[in-house]
Amino acid sequence: DTEVTQTPKHLVMGMTNKKSLKCEQHMGHRAMYWYKQKAKKPPELMFVYSYEKLSINESVPSRFSPECPNSSLLNLHLHALQPEDSALYLCASSQDPADEKLFFGSGTQLSVL
Amino acid sequence: GENVEQHPSTLSVQEGDSAVIKCTYSDSASNYFPWYKQELGKRPQLIIDIRSNVGEKKDQRIAVTLNKTAKHFSLHITETQPEDSAVYFCAASYGTGFQKLVFGTGTRLLVSP
């Protein structure tokens, strides 16, 4: 299995809702990432998990809460989002934190109303 | 931190022509330069990458060149086909211990039959 799988593919939520994005990989990769991509813009790094521990938080607002339950799973919990948070949220993995070769999932297209 | 500039923002070519996309980076310590192809609504896919100890790398119709002195690298696509139409992002790595990627702003390539 050489894929990073993300669910759901699309999500619409209100500003008072709580939702979660899920990401899974079975390549044995020990680094996992969350990126945010606005329309017609490049991906921007949000979080990096290394060996299931949060290693990098790129000054992301606390309404985004990442979680890594095990080496194969990565979640992003969403609460009290703003309309400007609408974007494509991409999960990625690499063999280890020093390996720059990223494998991206297909993303979750999030719309905040 | 690292800054990556990418040009042009859009590129239209006829099928069979060559296409060249150029990127410059700011951090001389960067040592890994991947190129990603992203079709509309799909995941970024790594198409080719190059490390700083190599000046050129080819993979069939795709090649990447790197000039470390000038801090720029380019993607060359020969014999373009309509299925090459997509957004292409260059990126450069930075950081110690944890490698991060900074992406260029993207080039929308349109190959007309």
Image (spheres, coloured by chain):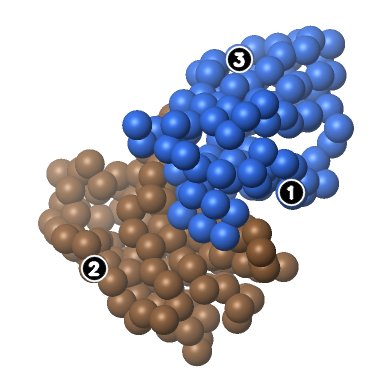
Chain colours: A blue, B brown
Q: Nearer the viewer, residue B61 or B33?
A: B33
Q: Mark 2 Cα within 10 Å, few/some/many (few <14, many 20+)? A: some
Query: Disc 1 is attached to a residue of which chain?
Result: A
Q: Position of residue A52 (x, y in %)?
A: 67, 38
User: Closer to the camera: disc 2 or disc 3?
Assistant: 2
- Residue B7 badge: none
> Which amino acid, by three-letter code, is at mark 3?
Leu
The answer to which of marks 1 and 3 sits earlier in the sequence is 3
Assess whether mark 3 and mark 2 are in contact (beta carbons under 8 angstroms).
no
| CA gap, disc 1 and disc 2 | 34 Å
Report the quarter where the N terminus of chain B lies: bottom right
Please, what secondary structure does the residue beneath circle 1 have? strand
Residue at which label 3 appears: A11
Secondary structure under tag 3 reads strand
Q: Give the residue number, with chain letter if any, for mark 2.
A: B58
The structure residue drawn at horizontal position 45% and vertical position 43%, both measured from the top left corner, is: A103
Q: Is residue B83 left or right of residue A97?
A: left
Image position, residue B11 (x, y; %): 36, 56
In the picture of the structure, the residue carrying the numbered disc 1 is: A55
